[in-house]
């Protein structure tokens, strides 16, 4: 998937008493991927930028990113940055299709299409066997 030039904005809040900051960040990023807020190919902010925005040490952010890479949620591409994996792992296999549908419908809405348009396009594509 083509990478986007700008970094995605992370919507994570680190709170005292909610566990180690690196774990809160890791869980927050994973939730955003699962919900479709962060999509495959989205570029995450550089470690230092993320650390400054969240008032964390760069090593804390790097530790979260590394953990997510090891779990298959993110892909590090050296100097190009860190990206959401093209095929992130699915928490539960039974929910995989439902999660994919949610992401598809959310993206269609972001592009200005309604559910009926999204369904029609999906039916048309499936009918042509373009998977």
Image (cartoon, rainbow, N blue to C red):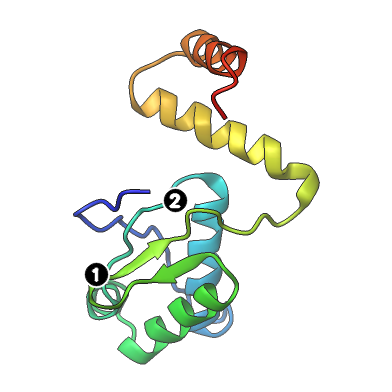
Residue 57 visible in image: no
Q: Mark 1: give few (<14), some (14-19) or many (20+) Cα within 10 Å.
A: few
Q: Is residue 70 above or below residue 87?
A: below
Q: Is residue 87 above or below residue 112?
A: below
Alpha carbon separation for disc pair 1 and 2: 15 Å
Q: Is residue 40 above or below residue 124?
A: below
Residue 121 visible in image: yes
Find residue 12 and report its horizontal and vertical position in percent: 42, 63
As rendered, which of 24 and 71 lies closer to the eye?
71
Element carrying mark 1: helix
- Would residue 45 be found to the left or right of residue 108 on screen? left
As rendered, which of 34 and 130 lies closer to the eye?
130
* Residue 128 disc label: none
Element carrying mark 2: loop
Q: Report the residue that reaches farthest toward the left.
A: 5
Which of the marked residues, 1 or 2, is nearer the chain's N terminus?
A: 2
Q: Quadrant of the C terminus?
A: top right
Find residue 13 and report its horizontal and vertical position in percent: 42, 66
* Residue 40 disc label: 2
Q: Which residue has dot 1 on it? A: 80
| Residue beneath the point at 35% across and 54% down | 42
Q: Are marks 1 and 2 in contact (CB under 8 Å)?
A: no
Q: Mark 2: give few (<14), some (14-19) or many (20+) Cα within 10 Å.
A: some
């Amino acid at each position: 998937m083509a990478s986007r030039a700008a970094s995605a904005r992370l919507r994570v809040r680190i709170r005292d008493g909610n566990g180690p900051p690196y774990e809160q960040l890791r869980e927050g990023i994973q939730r955003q991927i699962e919900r479709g807020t962060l999509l495959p190919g989205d570029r995450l902010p550089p470690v230092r930028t993320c650390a400054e925005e969240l008032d964390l040490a760069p090593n804390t952010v790097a530790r979260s990113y590394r953990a997510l890479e090891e779990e298959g949620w993110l892909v590090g591409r050296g100097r190009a940055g860190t990206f959401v994996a093209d095929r992130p792992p699915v928490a539960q296999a039974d929910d995989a299709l439902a999660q994919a549908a949610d992401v598809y419908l959310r993206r269609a809405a972001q592009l200005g299409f309604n559910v009926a348009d999204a369904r029609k396009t999906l039916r048309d594509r499936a009918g042509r066997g373009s998977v």
